Image (spheres, rainbow, N blue to C red):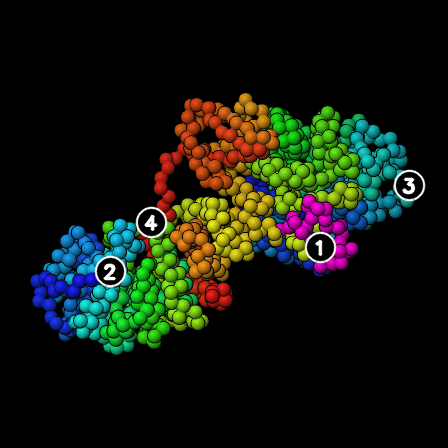
Amino acid sequence: MPPHPDGDWYKDAVFYEVHVKAFMDADGNGVGDFAGLTGKLDYLHDLGVDCLWILPMYPSPLRDDGYDIADFYGILPSYGTVEDFQKFLDAAHDRGLRVIADLVMNHTSDAHPWFQAARADRLSPQRDYYVWSDSDRKYREARIIFTDTEKSNWTFDPVAKQYYWHRFFSHQPDLNYDNPAVKTAMLDVMRFWLDRGLDGFRCDAVPYLIEREGTSCENLPETHTILKEFRRVIDAEYAGRVLLAEANQWPEDVRPYFADGDEFHMAFHFPLMPRLYMGVRREDRQPITDIFTHTPAIPPNCQWCLFLRNHDELTLEMVTNEERDYMYYAYASDPAMKLNLGIRRRLAPLMDNDRRRIELLNCLLLTLPGSPIVYYGDEIGMGDNVYLGDRNGVRTPMQWSDDRNAGFSSADPAALYLPVITNPTYHYQAVNVAAQEKDPASMLNTMRRLIAVRKRSPAWGRGTIEFLRPRNQAILAYLRAWRDDTLLVVANLSARTQPVELDLTAHEGAEPIEMLSGNRFPRVTRAPYFLSLGPHGYYWFRLERRERRPVRYGIEETAI
Amino acid sequence: MSSAAPEPRGAVATPATADVAVAVLTYNNVETVKMVAATAAAGLAQHFPGLSAVLIDADAGSSDGTPEALETAGLPLVVTHYEPPAGERAAVPFHGVPGRGEGLRAVFAAARELKARVCVVLEADVASVAPDWIRDLAGPVLTEKADFVGPAYARHRWEGTITRLLLSPLVRALYGRRLQQPFGGQQALSARLIDHLLVHPKWNWSGRDVSDLWITGAAIADGFAVWEAWLGPHAVRSRTRTNDLPTMLAETVGAVFTLMDRHQDLWLEVRGSEPLPTVGAPRAPLVEPRALEVDAMLDAFRLGVRDLGGIWDLILTPDTLGEVLVLENAPGPGFRFPDDLWARIVYEFALGHHYAVVHRDHLLRSLVPLYLGRTAAYVQVTRTATAQATEEMPEETARAFERQKPYLVEHWR
C-alpha cells in the first residue's frame, strides 16, 4: 500500500493504541520492543484495525512512562533502534496499517540536553527554550493537573537558581513556545519522523503551549497560532498525515483545536467516555444523548476520536462533581482504584467482566460519530492490577498465550517490566489471544466481527447522527446517515430485557437488515417499529430500500 | 441397474460392427442433440472418411422426442434405454443426465458389441461442439497412443471456478495427473479400456454415482494411457442441468469425496503429479472484463462464518477454523484466501465426510460459503492479471493441494 494515499483516511479508520514495552518482547529482556511488535503486525491486521498509535518511543528516564522525553530523535534502547523502528513502520505499511506516534510538544524531560544546557548556563541558547522565573507567583490562575503529586506549577532549580514552569510533573519542564527557536526545533523533530514515513502524531498536552498572566494558561489564542503553523508545514510537505490532539477539555473548548479545518485533523472526545459508563450503569440514555447536544459541529475534514479506555486513568475531569462521585461509587469501590481525578482500571474489570456490557460499550464505541480507538488488550478482555502503582495496572504485558509470561517474553518472570495479570478472573491462562483465536464466540472474534462490520459502511465514520426518542429511557437508538446509506443502532443499556417502539415513519418501506447476522427484519410501516432487546443487547441495522432479489454471483452458469 | 438391449433405429441401416462409436447420453435434449450428432458426423467425414461409425444413444427416458430426433442425424443409430434411479429423474444431477453411470455402462456395452476401436462420448447439450472435437478426441486412440482422452477447454478465467479452484487441484493431488476437467463431459475410450472397465469388479456400487471419476482413476491406476485434448470453448444449452451453486458443489465434491471413500486404492499412495500428454493447441484463459458479484460472494462467506461456525467446529481443526475466522473480517478489496489454508479446508472436509462427523449433505453444503470466499479472492487477484499470470494462479492452488496431501493421508484411516 502506498503509505499516505487518501487525504481523510482517518475518518474511516479504527485506531489501536499500543505500548511498545507491553506488546511483545522479541529479545527476551523482559521489555517489549519494536522487533516484537513487528512480529505481531499480522495479529493487528487480522483484528481489522487501520492505524496504530504508538505511545512514546523515545529515549527517556521513564519517570512518566516515556512522556518525559530526553531525545526526540532516538528510540528508547530497550525498544530497539531507529532502524528497528523503520523496519516496523515498513512492515506495517506493507500490511496496509498506518502508524502514528505520540509526540510530547509541551515539555521535555529534565534530563533532555536542552534542559541540562539551559539550567547550567543562563547564556546558553537553550536557556530560553524553557520558562524561567525568579518567583513562583506568576500564572497563579493556572490549575495544577497532577494534584496527587504536585503542589505547584513552579519548581526551583538550584543549578539555574530560578524557578521553571511545568504543567505536569516537576521533572517535565515546559518548553517556551514564545521562543521561535523552539517552534523550529519541534518542526525539525516532526520532519525527522515524517521523513521516515510516519503517518502522523498524537500530540500530547497541546492546550498548554503558551502562558499568559491572568489566564488559565490553557487554550490560549497564541497556542492555536503555533499549532496552525505546524499544520501548514505538514500539509505542505507531508500530504495524508494526521495530527491528533490530546486536549482533555469540554467539547466547546476542544472545538477551536479544529479551527477552520486548518489546525488538528482529530481530537479526543474526552467527556463522552465517562458518560458511556454512566449511561450503562444508570441504565439511562440521558448522559450519552446529553453530551452530544453539547458537542459542537466540526469542520467536514475533521473527526472526533472516541475511546473507552486508554493508558491513563479513566479521567473524570470532564464531569461534574456530582457525576464524579457517582462514577467513583459505581466503578471504584476500592480506594486503590482511584488516581488523580480518575479511575485506573481496564474496560473488562470496570464492567465486572460482564461480557454483555463489555460488548455493548464496544458497540457504542464503534457506532457513535467519530473514529474509535481500541486500547491494547481490551479486545480480549484483559484485566488490570490496581496495586502496581501509578497507571501501571493498565499497562501490563499483552496476554498472547498460556505460556510463561503469557507468551509475551521468554525472560525470567522477575525481569518483566511489570508482572503479568494472574488474578483468578483475568489470569493469562484463561484470557489470552491463542485461546480466543480458536473460539468463534470469543471476545476477540466478536471484536474482529464488530470492527469488520463497521468498516463495511462509511456512514459510521462520516455520517450524521440523529437520536430517536423512544419512551423507554433504557434504550439508546440512533440513526447514522451518509449519502444513500442509513444505519440504525438500537442498544439496551439495562441489565434486563426491554421492549421498545421506535418512530421510523420517515423510513417507511425500508427493510432493516441486521448487519452482524445479515438477517432481514420486517419492513418499516407507519406503525411504531417494535423490537425487544435482551439484557445489554444491541442491533446494528442497515435500512435497505432496494427490492429484494435472489442473490446471484455471476458464476453459476459455468461454475463446473 | 437395468438396461434394455440396444435397438437399431433410424434412416440409415446399422452395421454389425463399426470402427468408431459416437455416444450421447440423453434426457430431453431435443433442442441440441441433433446438432451434436450432425457435427459428429461432419467431423467423422472430414477427419476419418475411411472409417465406419455408429451413433449410440443411451436415453434416460426422454419425453420430448430426443431419440427420434437422432434418427435423421446422418449416422447409423443404436438406441439403448436404461432405467435411471427414480430420485435422479426428479432431481437431475448437475450434468443433466439421470443415472449417467448406467448410461455410460450401456454405451460401453453397445460399443463393445459393435467392436468399435474407439468410443467417443459427447454431451447431448453441448452447443459449442465442433467437427474437430472428433479428430482430437478419437485421434490419439485410433493411432493407439491413448486409451482415454479427456477434454480441456478454452474458458474465461472466471468460468469453471469449482473446477479450477477445487476439483482439478483435488483430483490432481489424488491421482497424480494434472487433469484440467475431471467432470469434462466429452471423452474417448479405447476398446481395450472399455473391455477392462466392463469386467472390472469395482464398477459396481449403489448410492452416489462416481463413474466419471472412477473411470479416469481406474485408467490411471491400471496403467492405461490417459491424454487430454484441447477442444476450444465449452458452452451448453440445457433444460435439465441445474445452475444452483450449492447443488453443483455438493454433487461434484460429494462425488470426489465418495470416490475417496470407496477407492482408496486409487489415491492413497500417490504423491506428486505429472502433466498429461495433450493433443491440440493449449489455450490461455480468456480475460475480457465480466461483471461478477464479488461483494455478494464475500457477504455469503461472512454470513457462513457466522452461521455455520457450529458445523465447521465439527469439521475443521481449531487451527484451521481460527484462520478462517480471521478471514471473515478481512476487508473486501484486499481479500485474500491462502492456498494452503484452502487445501487444508478441503482435506478436512474430505476427512469429515469420510468419518461422517455430520450429515454428509450438510457437510457438503456448508462448504459453499468457503468456496465463495475462495472464489472472491481469486477474482480479486486475477482482475487485473494477464492471461499468463491468471493461468499460474490455479497452478499455485494445485501445488498447495499436493503439499498438503500428506496431512490428508496421515489423518485418513
Label 4 secondary element = loop
- Going from N to C along the chain, the mark reached first, 1 or 3, is 3
Marks 3/2: CA distance?
Answer: 100 Å
| Structural crowding at the residue carrying mark 4, measured as other residues with C-alpha within 10 Å and reported as few (<14), some (14–19) or many (≥20) | few
Report the chain holding disc 4: B
Q: What residue is pinned by disc 4?
A: B244
Region in magenta: A405-433
Marks 2/1: CA distance?
Answer: 65 Å
Whether residue A441 is situated above or below residue B129 in the rendered picture: above
Towards the viewer: B145 or B325: B325
| Residue B316 located left or right of residue A384 | left
- Which one is in front in this view, the residue at disc 3 or the one at disc 2? 2
Q: What residue is pinned by disc 1?
A: A405
Residue beneath the point at 50% across and 58% down: B341
Q: What residue is pinned by disc 3?
A: A161
The quarter holding residue A558 reads bottom left
Label 3 secondary element = loop
- Going from N to C along the chain, the mark reached first, 2 or 4, is 2
Q: Position of residue B318 (x, y in %)?
A: 54, 55
